[in-house]
Amino acid sequence: MAVYRGKYILKGLDRITPEMERDLDLAYEVCASYGDSFPCEMCGRCCHQPNIAVLPGEVDSLSAASGIPLDEFVAGHLRRSADGGFLLKKTRPCEFLGADGLCTIWKGRPEICRDFPYAVSMFMSRVYIAITDPRADIIDMISYMDGSWPCTAAIRGSIASKVEEARAVRSRDGAS
Ligand code: SF4
Ligand code: SF4
């Protein structure tokens, strides 16, 4: 099982070749480019997802941020995922979504919430394919994203040019 950047598990791969790592880095940079200027309107729609992952190293900080004692948090607020990790038990919406539509544990929210929706595996894997396959249309590939979310429009309006720039870098570096 290959692991990219120490946390993204690439199922079905034994190792990441240097060429693949270069392309993954390009896809990662496209996704990360949304991080600093991401047009999140704090609408809370993405907090209605069914699966909200919690990394083992986040359990303590989530317990502290929520004010729920650790034992109680682990026993009553987490469940095991199929791959042995943790998920929040109460979702759709997340139990930490306030009545005002804002996250009540914002400073201590899990990493998946910090990355959402541009850097998690589903989005980044599509960006990777679009960068490495000139026939791939990134707009078609992200059609699964909910058009009623404010961030979706912003991503759809900018992602194609970011993919084109990454393709140009890849081509300049000699990839076929
Ligand atoms: S759906 Fe998009 S705009 Fe709304 S809170 Fe989530 S990331 Fe922000
Ligand atoms: S932890 Fe906060 S940001 Fe994450 S899903 Fe729950 S309410 Fe939303």
Image (spheres, grey):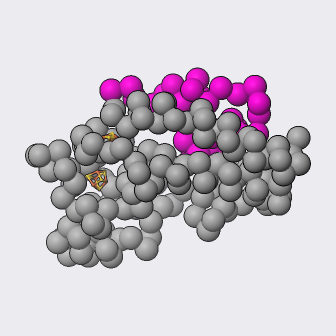
Q: Position of residue 10 (x, y in %)?
A: 67, 53
For the point 69% across and 44% down, the residue is 166
Q: Residue at x 60, y 58 (%)?
A: 8
Report which quarter residue 111 is drawn in.
Answer: bottom left
On the rendered image, what quadrant is the N terminus found in?
A: bottom right
Q: Residue 90, position in %: x, y?
A: 26, 50
Give the position of the C terminus as an image quadrant.
Answer: top right
Q: Is residue 77 left or right of residue 125?
A: left
Q: Is residue 126 magenta?
A: yes
**Can you say whether 117 is above or below 96 in the image?**
above
Residue 114 percent across, percent down from the top left: 39, 57
Q: How many marks?
A: 0
Q: Is residue 136 magenta?
A: yes
As drawn, 43 above or below 173: above
Q: Magenta region: which residues?
A: 120-148
Task: Identify the residue at horizontal 25%, vertical 61% (top origin).
Answer: 106
**Figure quarter occupied by ligand 1:** top left
Quadrant assignment, res 48: top left
Residue 170 visible in the snapshot: yes
Position of residue 22 measured from the top left corner of the image (x, y, whole percent): 76, 56
In the image: residue 18, left or right of residue 148: right
Q: Nearer the viewer, residue 131 or 161?
A: 161
Give the camera-side residue of 25 and 104: 25
Q: Is residue 76 visible?
A: no
Q: Which residue sits at x=27%, y=66%? A: 107
The one of 157 and 58 positioned closer to us in this rendering: 157
- Along the horizontal axis of the image, is 18 left or right of 34? right
- On the picture, is 60 further left or further right than 15? left
